[in-house]
Amino acid sequence: MTKRKSSGVDEYIAGCAKEAQGDLAKIRAAIRAAAPGAIERTDYFRMPGYSNPRVAYYDGMFAWFSFKKPHVRLHVPPSVIQEHRKELAGYATTKAIVSFPKGKPVPTTLVKKLVRASLKAMKDKDINSITAAHRS
């Protein structure tokens, strides 16, 4: 039996504050559910990230998660934050990060929706970059 290579995500979660580990695991599960077949990795930005092997743009990366006290955070392309700004009105956001407050349940349905939108946005960028390259 071959040992499965670690993606580093278990280690990342284990290295975070105990009070954040459950919420990080929930975000991880929501991303996996929304994007089955995505590759889980920690080589971009040294935080858990997900890539689609069928997308060349940005090496297929479409979502990340992290912990920065006191928030667990989801990182997605800026266009996804803009498209969903009404749904995100109750959360702290930056150009590409949604912060979920400590002590409140992680909105896994929203996380899945944002991840699906992120994957679509990256696929669309991939198609657009391929199309532009063919025009040159």
Image (cartoon, grey):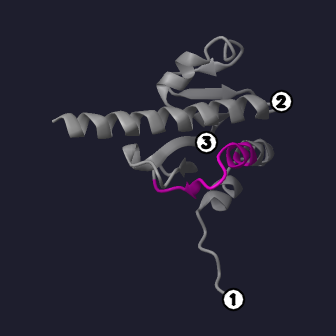
CA distance for labels 3 and 1: 32 Å
The picture places residue 50, in percent across and down from the top left corner, at: 56, 49
Q: Would residue 30 be counted in the magenta stretch? A: yes
The C terminus appears in which quarter of the rendering?
top left
Where disc 1 sits, the SS reads: loop
The N terminus appears in which quarter of the rendering?
bottom right
Where disc 2 sits, the SS reads: loop
Res 135 quadrant in image: top left
| Amino acid marked by disc 2 | Gly
The picture places residue 88, in percent across and down from the top left corner, at: 67, 17
The picture places residue 57, in percent across and down from the top left corner, at: 38, 43
**Rendered view: 14 above or below 85:** below
Q: Is residue 135 left or right of residue 128?
A: left
Q: Would residue 115 be counted in the magenta stretch? A: no
Of mark 2 and mark 3, the one earlier in the sequence is 3
Q: Nearer the viewer, mark 3 or mark 1?
A: 1
**Rendered view: 21 above or below 114:** below
CA distance for labels 2 and 3: 16 Å
Q: Residue 1, which numbered label? A: 1
Which portion, as a residue range, is magenta? 28-43
Where disc 3 sits, the SS reads: strand
Depth check, front residue: 119 or 3: 119
Depth check, front residue: 85 or 23: 85
Residue linked to disc 2: 103
Q: Residue 66, which numbered label? A: 3
Q: Residue at 62% of width from left, 27% of height from top?
A: 98
| Amino acid marked by disc 3 | Ser
